[in-house]
Each structure stands twice: as structure tokens, then as C-alpha cells.
Amino acid sequence: MNINKRKRILGRKKSGSAMTEFSGAMIIFILFIFAPLLNIGILPVRYLIAHGIISEMAHRMAVCEKRTEAQKLLKNNSWWTNLLSACGVTVKNPDAQLVIVDKGNSKSNVSINAILPNDKLPNGSGGPFMYSIQLSADCDISPLFNAGAGLPGFTSPVTLHLSSQAQWENLGRNPETTLYYINE
Amino acid sequence: MGKSWSQSGNHFVLHQRIIKRNVLLNVDKKCDMRRRIKNIGRKRRERGNMLVLGSVVLAIVGLGLLIGYSYGGLVFTHNRLQGSADEIALAGARKLNENDRIGQMNNMVARARQLVMESQLHLDKVQSDFPQLQSIAQEQLDEAQDCALELDQQRSYLKGLATGESIVAMEKKFDQIKGQYPMSLPWLKVGSPSLNKMRLGFLENVETNVEELKNIQELEDHDEAKGYIKNSPGLKLYKQGESKYLPAPNESIHFYMSSLAAPVEKTVSPAHIVLSKAYQKLDYPVIPTCTQVEITLKVGTGLGGNANQDMKVESAAAATGASPPQ
């Protein structure tokens, strides 16, 4: 075997071993540094998007004429859950509440289905009141590469309780029923 | 001598060998040195490769996150723009029924209508029962008709005034807000918003603020027959929109009444934001009581070729409701 041939073989072996080592290192790098970094990095982005969409939904509910319309909007409209789903966020247990703040700044939460007692209405004895719709939901925010199980945020979704509040707009009364729209 | 030559000859050979060996050793050393240098270079290059690749990967991750954050920024900008649109629509809506001018106009139209009807009934009665008083009754009717026509003109004038003031209020609000938007960050570019549409109309399912006027049975029957009144368990209100014509011979006089939230037990409906789809355009020449605006904003993520787009938001607001009649 001449020297050139030997050298060539030796050269191949050296570079080959480097490639093997390098590819191994790359796999470790991608699996343990690159992917987790990307996964954890995407969470705040998805959080921002989820919060924005929940705020938009709360705003839409708050500008409804009646509270029953707001309930229907939440029940029958799946655009926001579908949109969030497309963004990698699964919405669970969406719930809306009416938040009432009186002049003494004390806060009370009432279910969106509940009927307000007379003293909590805009002309009630404890008034004036500020009313807000609070929409909250448990959001499973998935990382970019979701393995379904494992460490939350790195390989599996993180569950966060997101909520947003929007001021109830219509404080008038319905001339047809003489009831406050907020109580209909 | 020969020995010495021989010895010196051997010495020469030995010397030659030593020199040769030294040369060979030097050559080996040089080769070894070269090889070592080569290996060090290769090692350096391999380490350099990892560093470059690591940096590239980190740069890609960073770029990806930056793009992600810029899209998050778009959602934030959208919510901000929606808030601005709400403010603009509300500013216009508040101006429409300032000092309850539409509510009062509606009440005056309804009363002018009642007056014409009553004058006509008087004239009919006088013609049959007291013909000597016909001229006075006719004069009263003419006056009531003139009053109704004059009021209709005033209503048209008020429509122009309220519309103009509302538009000015919306434009003024927009001018206050638009300067807050332009922003140029490496990952988010926001342009100046533009106020595309300002529409004035009415809110669906809201009738007039005027309750059905009693005391003239003929008028009540006529309104009932024509379907001018909204029958509900609460207040019986005139429907908004089309002219509430009187029976002949006064059918040519227009009595338009605008849609406006009626006061209920002295509760006045405040101006408020409504769902944009609740806005309805005007089909009749009535005074508008609802505003709708559309704003667009040029936004771009600053990264990627097709990331620029026009963000569009709509908002609508209803005017302040009518006050209880004086």
C-alpha cells in the first residue's frame, strides 16, 4: 500500500469520526438546547395572543345590549376558541361573571346567569355601581413541539388561568319590559 | 598511517552516518512539527465550526422568537386600535343627542301631529254643528299645518347640524389619537391610522322615545290600524323610521321621528358602545342616533416579505337616550 493511499484512508477516518462526533453533538444540541429553548420561547407569544383574544371576546360581550345576549355570544360563538386552538392554545372551562364595584370600591362577583337584586341595580341603594364582564378560562398553552407529556412548558402544555375584564356598556332600561338591560 | 587512514576512514563513515541520521531526524522533526501544526489547525477549525453553527442556530431561534413576539405585538395593537375606534364612535354618538335635542324634536313632531289631527277634527265638527265658526276652525287648522311644515324644516336643519357636529367630534377625536400610533421597531412597524368610514344611522330594535299620545280616539285608532305603535307590555312607543302620516286630507304632511332610547321611570340611557352589527343604516330622512366608524392601520412585523397588512377595526356607539318629557 503506497503512502498516498494510506494517507487518504487515514484522512477519511479522521474526518469521518469528526462527522460522527459532530452529528451526535448536533442531536444533543437540538434535543436538549435548541428545541427546549424554542418551546419555552414560544410560550409568552402564545400567552400574548391568548390574552388578546380573550380581551376581544370580553369586549364583545360587554357591548351586548342585554346580558342574555352576552351569554348567548359566549355559548354559541366558537370563533375565539377555534382561533386560539389554531394558535396552539386549548381553551377549557370558559366562564363569565359580572363584576360589580360600588362607590366604596368593594367588589362582588355575580354569575352571568344570575339575576341582580334591586339593591345592586344602577339605581340601587348602594350605587352608583360600575359593572364589568369578566371572562376567564383555563388555557393549555402548548409549546411548539408538543410531546403531550413531560415537563410543562418544555415538552407538554402549560395550563394558565387567563381572565380579562371589560366594562358593561348598556346601563339603560328596556322600554318594552321596563327592566334594566343588564338584568335581562 | 594506513591504520590511521583506515581509522580516519571509519571515522569519516561514522561521521557521514551521524550527519545522515541527524538530517533524517531533522526531517522527521519537521514532518512531525508540520503534522502537529496541521492537527492543531484542524482541531481549531472543528471547534470553530461548532461555534459558528451554535451561533447560527441561536440566531435562528432569536429570529423566530422575534417574529413570534412581533405577531404578539399585532394582537396588542389590534386591541389598542379597537379601543381608539370605540372612543371615536362614542365621541360622535354623544354629540348627536346633545341636550336631548333629538328627544325634544321627536316629542314636538308627535305633538304637532296631534295638533293637526285635533284641528282637523274640530273643523269637521264645526262644519256640521257650528258653521258660523268655520273660519276660525279653518284658521286653527292652517296654523297647525304651517306649524307642522315649519317643524319638519327645523327637523331637517337639526339633522344637518347634529350630523355635522358629530362628524366634527369624531374627526377631532381621531386627530387626537392618530399621533400615538406610528412606531418603528425592528420587529414591529406601525403606521398612521386612517379613518376610512364614518357612518350615521340608528340602533336596531330601538324605537322612538315618544309614547303613544292619548285623548284623541280617532288618532289612536288610526295609528293602531297603520301599525305605527309598537305593542309591548311596557311603554307603547311610536316606531322609528317611516313618516307617521295622518288620515286625509292631511296625508301629505311628513311626521318623521328618530330612533332613540326612551326614558324609563326617569332613567336616561347613557351613550354607549354597541356591537357593530347592531348598527343600521338610515332608510328615511330622520336624524341619526348611532355612529359607526372604521379605522385601518398599516402594520408590519418588520420581518418577512409579506408581513405587512392593513389592520381594520369597526366600532359603533348609540347616542344618549331621551330625557323624560317636560
Image (cartoon, rainbow, N blue to C red):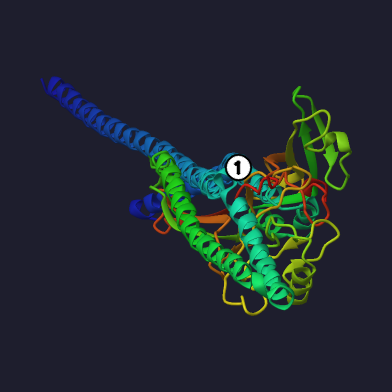
Front residue of this view, candidates B161 and B73: B161
- Tally of numbered tags: 1
Q: Is residue B319 in view from this perspective?
A: yes
For label 1, the SS is helix
Query: Of all residues shown, which one is farthest toward the left?
Result: B1
Which residue corresponds to the image point at 60% horizontal and 42% vertical from the top-left?
A48
Which residue is nearer to you in this view: B170 or B11? B170
Image point 85% across, 38% down: which residue?
Answer: A110
- Side of A184 relative to A45 (left or right): right
Residue B171 point in image, percent of width and height: 42, 48
Q: At 64% from the left edge and 42% from the top edge, which residue is drawn?
A: A47
Residue B9 lies left or right of residue A67; in this view the side is left
Q: Considering depth in this image, is B137 or A139 the residue closer to the camera?
A: B137
Q: Which residue is mark 1?
A: A48
Q: Amino acid at mark 1?
A: Leu
Camera-side residue of A43 and A129: A129
